[in-house]
Image (tube, rainbow, N blue to C red):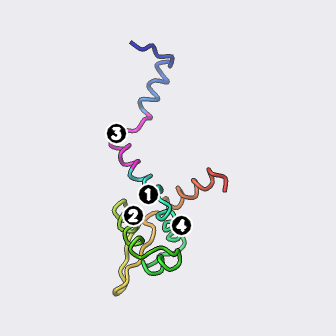
Amino acid sequence: MDVLLLDKRTQSLVVDYVPTDDMLFDLVKFFSIFSDVTRLKMLSALAISEMCVNDISAVLRINQTTVSHQLRLLKNLGAVRRRRQGKVIFYSLKNELINDVLLKGVEFLGY
């Protein structure tokens, strides 16, 4: 049997603080939003303005197919929302907390 050096109170705090497996899996999905350079570029742009696929592609110089693929992934992860105006679909951040996390990462890195 392993002997723990932690006192009972600290052990209890650790057990209570560590997220459940379900929450951990959800956190992994959430943080995967930020694990791709193209997605980060797109999230940064969408933090400024809602945009359509064509605008994102042109402004960021990313292939439209890639933009559409990444937007679909971001939508499935709950990071962006869509708004249709006629034949054009505009994308925006679903929640400003996405941008807050991105900015905290920039702050952490010291930029």
Counting residues from the start of the chain, the first of labels 4 and 3 encountered is 3
Q: Quadrant of the C terminus?
A: bottom right
Check contact, mark 4 vs mark 3: CB within 8 A.
no
Check contact, mark 2 vs mark 1: CB within 8 A.
yes
Labelled disc at residue 21:
3
Check contact, mark 4 vs mark 2: CB within 8 A.
no
User: Mark 1 = which residue?
Assistant: 33
Residue type marked 1: Ile
Q: For mark 1, does the 10 Å Cα neighbourhood hold few (<14), some (14 to 19), or many (20 or more) residues?
A: some
User: Mark 2 = which residue?
Assistant: 74
The secondary structure that dominates the magenta segment is helix
Counting residues from the start of the chain, the first of labels 2 and 1 encountered is 1
**Residue 104, position as x, y percentages in the image:** 58, 54
Where is residue 22, by image quadrant? top left
Counting residues from the start of the chain, the first of labels 3 and 1 encountered is 3
Q: For mark 4, does the 10 Å Cα neighbourhood hold few (<14), some (14 to 19), or many (20 or more) residues?
A: some
